[in-house]
Amino acid sequence: MKRNVILDTGPLVALIDAADRDHTWSVQQWSDIEPPMLTCESVVSEACFLLNQIDRGAEVVFEMLSRETIEMSFRLQDHSKFVRNLLVKYSKVPMSVADACLVRMAEQIPGSSVFTLDGDFRIYRKHGRQVIPLIVPERMKS
C-alpha cells in the first residue's frame, strides 16, 4: 500500500545540495518513497530560495514538479483559517507558514507522515493533540 508522504523544505534541499549534511540520508529516503510526495507552495518557495546558490538548484525543483515527483496538493486560501490558528498557537516556537501548511496537510491526509529535518515537528500536533508521524534522521528521533 502506498503511503502518503508530506514533504518539508529540508529533505528537498538536502537531496539537491550534495554539500548538505543530510544529503546521503535524504537520497536514501527518496529512493524508498513512492512518488509523488505532497507539499505546498510555501515549501517550494523556501526550497528555491535556499537552493539559489546551487547550480540549477531551483530548476531541479521545477523539474520535479513537472515530472510529478512532488505535487502541490494544498491550497492555502482553502485552509487559511486553520493555518492562521496554528501560527497563533505555535507563535512562541515560532512556526513558519510552510510548517503550518504541512501540519494542516497532515490533518487532512489520513495515514500520512511528514518528511522533515525540522525538530519543531516533534512539538506540533495535528487536530490539537495527535502526534504527527515523521520521517526524520535517527539523530532527531530521541
Image: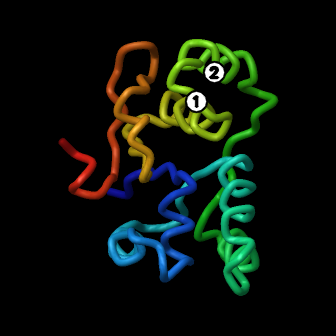
In which quadrant is the C terminus drawn?
top left
- The residue identified by callout 1 is 95
In which quadrant is the N terminus drawn?
bottom left
- The residue identified by callout 2 is 87
How far separated are the C-alphas under marks 1 and 2? 6 Å
Residue found at x 44% / y 23%? 126
Above or below 11: residue 140:
above
* Three-letter residue code for mark 2: Leu
Local packing at callout 1 (Cα closer than 10 Å; few below 14, some 14-19, many 20+) is some
Q: Position of residue 71 (x, y in %)?
A: 65, 58
Residue found at x 49% / y 82%? 18
Local packing at callout 2 (Cα closer than 10 Å; few below 14, some 14-19, many 20+) is some
Q: Foreground residue, 3 or 86?
A: 86
Q: Position of residue 81 (x, y in %)?
A: 73, 16
Q: Position of residue 17 (x, y in %)?
A: 54, 77
Please say whether residue 66 is visible from this viewpoint: no
Q: Foreground residue, 31 or 25?
A: 25
Specify whether 41 is left or right of 139: right
Task: For mark 2, give the secondary structure.
Answer: helix
Specify whether 2 is left or right of 68: left
Q: Position of residue 131 (x, y in %)?
A: 32, 27
- Disc with the residue nearer the chain's start (1 vs 2): 2
Q: Pointers 1 and 2 in contact (CB under 8 A)?
A: yes
